[in-house]
Image: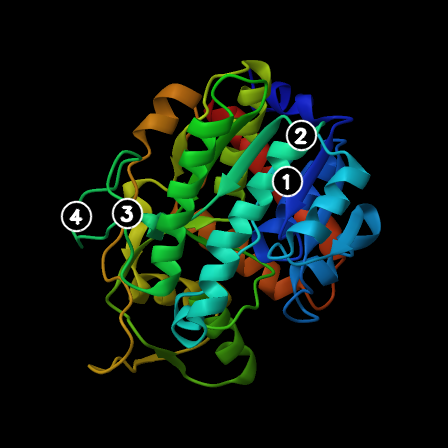
């Protein structure tokens, strides 16, 4: 069965996305809308007026709500009112450096917020399938060269990473305690370092690079020699959608944790990423601004994706050069193009490549 056949299951379904105003959430909203889903979004305001959510005008194509997942009563009220059937939970405080500045908010959002979403899911009469997104940083990072498997230890040095490890424990507890023997299915998903068009969040490497280039300034790299599993935003989103579809096709199966990272050839240094972005953009230069006293960030991190490859028949579609090309294409064109059409063009190109590699 090709990817298009699997994803047809979303047509006509009411799908709730938390964090739909964010980078990944906006792309997921556009993709699900194109599949014929009735999309409901609950999130805080977008970060900037240049965000993919704003420029794509996806808010006017879905049921768009502002809300904070830390407020269980308000969140549950929207769920009860809209009666969604499927949930993708992406809402989070997503930044490592921000977590050092606001640890309480980070823990409240990423742990207690996840508890609230799980409670609303548990009490909903209509929600039956839920995909809960955490992070590759949920693992106890030993800075080794091997990719982390889904069964490896949860952990986290900084508040963000530990909040994601804790969220995974919460999700697993709810799965074991409440969803083992009924008709509700939940799974968790962990992606790599996701890049692509439309992200303007602070402390993001691609955002820092693009912003510096647009201002005509030299790019300053905090950790040029740290390695990350770089992947385009459509890669993990395709994994989430495939996982949700398979959970609906085969009730009771796939209710576990999954890694959706890139191939090992995409695990490269920040310097490699910067050099290739500059080359594709056609201008820019960088300098090393790393300091010994700066806040701790992981130096080496990768995911083992064999489980998703074997059990879900999922695999990455874009190599590193294609990932760079898709990303730069958006940032080069966002000022003078219809962004919704641009996103749809990239989604169609991506699914075409996916079907060729299936």
Q: CA distance from mark 3 to mark 1?
A: 33 Å
Location of residue 100 (image quadrant): bottom left
- N-terminal of the pair, mark 3 or mark 4, is 4
SS at mark 2? loop
Location of residue 303 (image quadrant): top left
Which residue has dot 3 on it? 302
142 sits to left or right of 46: left
Contact? badges 1 and 2 (CB < 8 Å): yes
SS at mark 1? helix
Residue 145 - label: 4
SS at mark 4? loop
Q: CA distance from mark 1 to mark 4?
A: 39 Å
In front of the other: label 1 or label 4?
Answer: 1
Residue shown at the point (67%, 30%) measured from the top left: 127
Estimate the x, y position of residue 161 in percent, counting from the top left: 35, 57
In front of the other: label 2 or label 4?
Answer: 2
* Few, some or many residues within 10 Å of mark 1 (<14, 14–19, 20+): many
Estimate the x, y position of residue 95 in percent, counting from the top left: 45, 65
Which residue has dot 1 on it? 120
Contact? badges 1 and 4 (CB < 8 Å): no
Contact? badges 3 and 2 (CB < 8 Å): no
Name the image quarter holding the N terminus. Answer: top right
Which residue has dot 2 on it? 127
**Placement of 225 over or under 233, stated as above or below:** below
Estimate the x, y position of residue 47 in percent, counting from the top left: 63, 69
Q: CA distance from mark 2 to mark 4?
A: 40 Å
């Amino acid at each position: 069965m090709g990817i298009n056949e699997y994803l047809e299951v979303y047509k006509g379904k009411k799908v709730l996305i938390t964090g739909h105003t964010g980078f990944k959430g906006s792309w997921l909203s556009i993709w699900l809308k194109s599949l014929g889903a009735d999309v409901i979004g609950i999130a805080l305001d977008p970060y900037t007026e240049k965000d993919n959510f704003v420029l794509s005008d996806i808010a006017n194509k879905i049921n768009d709500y502002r809300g904070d997942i830390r407020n269980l009563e308000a969140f549950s009220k929207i769920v009860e009112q809209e009666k969604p059937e499927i949930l993708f939970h992406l809402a989070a405080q997503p930044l490592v450096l921000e977590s050092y500045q606001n640890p309480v908010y980070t823990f409240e959002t990423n742990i207690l917020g996840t508890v609230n979403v799980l409670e609303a899911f548990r009490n909903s009469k209509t929600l039956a399938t839920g995909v809960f997104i955490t992070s590759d940083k949920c693992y106890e990072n030993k800075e080794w060269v091997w990719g982390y498997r889904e069964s490896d230890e949860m952990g986290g040095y900084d508040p963000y990473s530990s909040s994601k490890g804790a969220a995974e424990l919460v999700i697993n507890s709810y799965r074991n305690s409440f969803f083992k023997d009924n008709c509700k299915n939940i799974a968790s998903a962990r992606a790599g370092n996701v890049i692509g068009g439309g992200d303007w969040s602070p402390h993001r490497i691609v955002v820092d690079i693009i912003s510096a280039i647009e201002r005509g300034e030299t790019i300053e790299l905090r950790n040029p020699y740290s390695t990350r599993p770089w992947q385009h935003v459509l890669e993990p989103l395709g994994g989430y959608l495939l996982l949700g579809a398979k959970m609906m096709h085969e009730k009771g199966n796939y209710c576990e944790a999954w890694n959706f990272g890139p191939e090992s050839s995409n695990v490269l240094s920040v310097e490699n990423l910067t050099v290739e972005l500059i080359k594709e953009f056609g201008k820019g230069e960088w300098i090393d601004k790393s300091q010994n006293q700066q806040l701790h960030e992981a130096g080496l991190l990768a995911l083992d994706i064999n489980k998703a490859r074997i059990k879900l028949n999922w695999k990455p579609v874009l190599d590193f050069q294609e990932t760079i090309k898709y990303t730069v294409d958006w940032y080069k064109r966002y000022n003078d193009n219809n962004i919704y059409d641009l996103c749809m063009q990239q989604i169609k190109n991506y699914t075409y490549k996916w079907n060729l590699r299936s």
